[in-house]
Amino acid sequence: MPDQAREGDLAATMRDIGVRARRAAALLAEAPASAKAAALHGAARKIRERIAALLAANAKDVAAAEAAGTGAFVDRVRLDPKRIEAIAAGLDDVAALPDPVGRELARWPRPNGLDIARVAVPFGVIGIVYEARPNVTADAGGLSIKAGNAAILRGGSESFESSAVLVEALRDAVAEAGLPADAVQRVPTRDREAVGILLSTPGLCDVVVPRGGKSLIERVMREARVPVIAHLEGLCTTYVHEAADPAMARAIVHNAKMRRVSVCGATETLLIDRAAAARLLPAILDDLAASGCEVRGDSFVVALWPRAKPASEQDWSTEFLDAIIAVKLVDGLDQAIAHINRHGSHHTDAIVTSDAHAAEAFLARVDSAIVLHNASTQFADGAEFGFGAEIGISTQRLPPRGPVGAEQLTTYKYVVRGAGQIRP
């Protein structure tokens, strides 16, 4: 697909997208749950039917990524039949979820007879700015539809061709379900100026969801004139406590780092109690090294496992998104928690231990959106939480926090029913 917006005025193109999204949002907000579900099931079907076209488009994106990026970066862009089926299945899963719109969140009577209810409603128009992974296109579009929102998608140039095919599948399915196709629109240019227009033009969208690297998130938060659901980098830590089961620790750490190194839930830092390091750490690092992982350790780790490279101070605050892990010895739970709260990105952190008291202290005191006990950080995924899919993992303290699925893409209003009451 050519850069359509370069053929005309970019600001005018973006305004037109916004106007059409606003009209679509008004209709979608009142759409029955059955129509939204039909649109999502239809999109899943069309993606499966267009697998050849999607693979051909993705081949162009991968070729460009291979010329410009690392193996892990290419992995984020690449699609194969298994990943495409996962995209389609995710849409089917979202379709099958309860409709989040119209949920009565709370209800109570007042002494004067007023009946007050808090009811979930769509945001309206959501601007979604993201990098690399083409599956985000389908996840973001599908979740927005489920929540009754219109979506303006501005994906990364790395997945430009793949996203075009996915958006057309979504739009065709939405139209066939009797809903406005403009409920899902893609910014038709790689020009980064389009992001600035999306963020700063009044009325273009009601909320912005950025998903990508630190520089993208910082730009969105700096330039946005509407609320931002922030998805910061996934600087995740696994802490192996001295009471950890050895076999469990080996399995969890290996999966948390190596299952897929390019996702935001991949563990980047491994902490281990000094009291258990000699007993537990060598086998854990042997497993990682055997899978091609580079180990960077503090001086104590290097002394214990000489194949480790010396870690720099920067390594404790780096999201590698690659087969690299930083490893540090700590003197117990308090030091581990302090390290995570200082160096982490408040995304996802895990403790491996058979000590229930230590586990509960970790879960209570680590200030992250997701905290786990005896489980891999790679479970930081909306689908694994039963959300069908996710737009991202929100690391902000205000809600939504954690995986952002359809339910998290709604706000609420108060519905007050009276019988003629007037205020004295």
Image: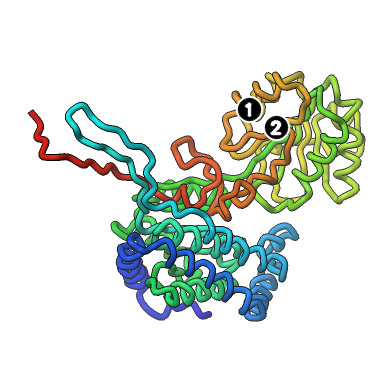
Residue closer to the observer: 412 or 260: 412
Q: Can residue 89 be seen in this view?
A: yes
Q: Mark 2 points at which residue?
A: 373
Residue 375 vertical placement versus 29 (above, below): above
| Residue at x 61%, y 28% (from the top left corner) | 366
Instruction: Answer with mark 2 or mark 1, whichever residue precedes in sequence.
Output: 1
Residue 413 vertical placement versus 192 (above, below): above
Q: Where is residue 370 in the image (x, y as percent from the top left)?
A: 60, 37
Look at label 2 and name its amino acid: His
Q: For this view, does 328 lie left or right of residue 388?
A: right
Q: Is mark 1 on a helix, strand or loop?
A: helix
Q: For this view, does 178 lie left or right of residue 268?
A: left
Q: What element carries label 2?
A: strand
Residue closer to the observer: 266 or 409: 409
Q: Name the residue under label 1.
A: 363
Q: For this view, does 51 lie left or right of residue 248?
A: left
Q: Position of residue 159 (x, y in %)?
A: 59, 68
Q: In which quarter of the image is the C terminus?
A: top left
Residue closer to the observer: 121 or 191: 121
Contact between marks 2 and 1 (CB within 8 A): the answer is yes
Tell me where residue 195 sits by quadrant.
bottom left
Which numbered tag is attached to residue 294? none
